[in-house]
Image (cartoon, grey):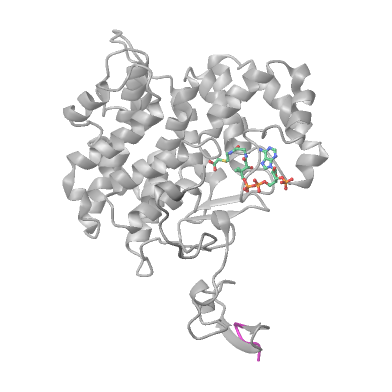
Amino acid sequence: MPQNTFTITDNRTGKSYEVPIDHNTIRALDLRQIRVNPEDFGTMTYDPGLGNTAASKSSITYIDGDKGILLYRGYPIEQLAEKSTFLEVAYLLIHGELPNQPTLDKWTHDVMHHTFVHEDLKRMLQAYRYDAHPMGMLIGGLAIMGTLHKEARQVQDEKVRNKQILRILGKMPTVAAYAYRHRIGRPYNYPNSDLDYTSNFLYMLDYLHQSHYDVNPVLAKALDVLFILHADHEQNCSSAVMRSIGSAQADPYNAMAGAAAALFGPLHGGANEAVIKMLAEIGDVKKVPDYVERVKKGEFRLMGFGHRVYHSYDPRATIIKKVAYDVFEVTGSNPLLEIAVALEQVALSDEYFVKRKLYPNVDFYSGIIYQAMGFPPDMFTVLFALGRAPGWLAQWNEMITDPDTRIVRPMQIYLGHSKRDYVPMEERKA
Ligand code: CMC
């Protein structure tokens, strides 16, 4: 009868160890018993970037990177993008099931009821420099919220947690819109809770006290779909940060600030901004082959290409490409689109990219859409953060309530000096 175990033989000692397998995974701590001498620390695993280490069990998002499948709580991203709304998806991710109509109505009311921010927060945001990066303002704004809602530190209290979830979802678009208005030197707009979540965000960005102002429904719908596509992506870099900070039982505002800071990096959510810079730098379809050659020589990476888990077309990129054409019907096409399409064609037929299974990711086309909608490039990652907020909160909530959770504290392989004595200044070499 086959056993669900591994038998590991340590050739240094000839001893064998039986280690249980659960979900194709062994517990790293089971390796600790493998040692040569009783006083040894025991065996560890080395996994920079945690490419093959499960740090949590999760029921939120499933990705099959080879088949290009992405499911939120079991529902395919394609169906959610077509049929759902961002707030409904946020409820699904955080609470685990699609809400019925009364539940969705209450959830929508509760989130929209929390869109106003404390005037102190507004004043603090106004103190940022005129050219502050809006991601810096969003990260700062989230941390400031932690100082305003002090009960948030009671992370073990479900009621308190749920209250902060509503506050964060409600207030993040307001902070993001303030950051944008700050940058362009316009007065901040207060939220309008008569509008849906995404229309309210666009309203706060654009409203200039016109007597008739309507949010364009096609653009609001497109942005809502983009938010859905970004809403969660299982254990990505920023969600891992959210869980990591949260594991120390910091309040969710500070954990969100940390997650947003991780997202800001150009290898993560900052890639959409980097794609636009790259396309502008290429500047002409004719220059695409030369640019690709330089990427292959290792001079730089093709931004918006490649993914740690997708080794086929990112399903979100397929949906985004469709959304792009809806947006361009309203805004007119983005001249960078032609360069992007040419770049994609060259890259997808080139052996370098084929061999490494490098395909366009979610960031390749999203920036082009945002730019056509009138967003400046430094707002792109802010838009990613607004979309990702329910994912971070769902991951945090799951982590807090998981009895397996321990404070994150990775191990290291120490390669430094062994103990040595302090050297007085006069004896140190130049
Ligand atoms: N352009 C050129 N070569 C690449 C690229 C790229 N964009 N991405 C990976 N490679 C090459 C890399 O040089 C390496 O080649 P070799 O085996 O010859 O050394 C091979 O492919 C594997 O790369 P890796 O760095 O081991 O892959 P990773 O899983 O650690 O990195 C990634 C994933 C997304 C950071 C990387 O693909 C990348 O830097 N892409 C560009 C930035 C980007 O678009 N980021 C957005 C990711 S999607 C949104 C998100 O999750 O935030």
Locate residue 101, reporting x and y percent: 33, 46
Q: Is residue 83 left or right of residue 317?
A: left
Is residue 145 visible to us here? yes
Residue, far front? 426
Locate residue 282, reporting x and y percent: 69, 20
Q: Residue 58: within the magenta?
A: no
Residue pictured at 73% horizontal, 32% vertical: 295
Residue, far top? 211
Quarter of the image where one finds residue 114: top left
Residue nearer the viewer, 380 or 51: 51
Whether 142 is drawn above or below 403: the answer is: above
Whether 63 is drawn above or below 118: the answer is: below
Residue nearer the viewer, 135 or 72: 135
Q: Disc count in the image?
A: 0
Whether 414 is drawn above or below 293: the answer is: below
Is residue 232 visible to us here? no
Residue pictured at 68% horizontal, 49% vertical: 311
- Location of the N terminus (image quadrant): bottom right
Where on the image, by quarter, is ligand 1? Answer: top right
Locate residue 263, reporting x and y percent: 46, 39
Residue nearer the viewer, 112 or 159: 159
Q: Main secondary structure of the magenta part?
A: loop
Residue nearer the viewer, 269 or 202: 269
Locate residue 8, reporting x and y percent: 63, 82
Q: Is residue 308 left or right of residue 380?
A: right
Q: Is residue 318 left or right of residue 172?
A: right
Residue, far bottom? 1
Residue pictured at 33% horizontal, 15% vertical: 207
Residue pictured at 79% horizontal, 46% vertical: 355
Magenta-highlighted residues? 1-6
